[in-house]
Amino acid sequence: MGKTTAMKMEELHTLVGTEVGVTEWFPVTQDRIETFAKATEDDQWIHTDPVRAEADSPYGTTIAHGFLTLSMISYLSRGILSVDNVRLRINYGLNKVRFPNAVRAGANIRGHFVLQEVKDIARGIETTFAVTIEVEGSTKPCCVAEWIVRHYR
């Protein structure tokens, strides 16, 4: 993954407004797309039928589910920010999720994480990140979202 920034929970507010990291490129393979399709019962041909997608899709190939891309945020963030004294980290929610660009099978994606807000909560903190997931070779991101994470002591 990308460079890791280690911080004490009490110091995290000093990073508000800054990009805390950019991840390494991650391949989105057809196998991963099909596994996601099976897990979610979303087996539309645009995702699972390369022959039909080549003939009928405006993308010329299959594409990843938007929710597959969104679900990669947690994984992509692993190597970005390490917060000391955290016993448990959970996804609390998302705001303003959009999928402005498709991810073609075989493409590489990576995440950019900007820390927008840090709030104190009982037994920890709540962070909000502006996340932008880009597709290698494209100027338009494939996913943008505000990601809310709770970190408990």
Image (cartoon, helix red, strand yellow):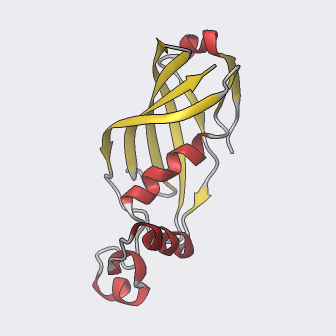
> Residue at (66%, 24%) from the top-left corner?
86
Residue 47 % position (x, y): 39, 75
Q: Is residue 56 above or below residue 16?
A: below
Give 149 or 115, whichever is nearer the viewer. Answer: 149
> Residue at (52%, 72%) from the top-left corner?
35
Q: Quadrant of the C terminus?
A: top right
Q: Is residue 60 above or below residue 139?
A: below
Residue 61 % position (x, y): 40, 78
Q: Is residue 135 above or below residue 56?
A: above
Quick check: 99 left or right of 69?
left
Q: Residue furthest front?
A: 122
Q: Quadrant of residue 9?
A: top right
Residue 150 % position (x, y): 51, 27
Q: Is residue 106 above or below residue 91?
A: below
> Residue at (35%, 83%) from the top-left corner?
53
Residue 12 % position (x, y): 59, 15
Q: Quadrant of the N terminus?
A: top right
Quick check: 64 left or right of 18?
left
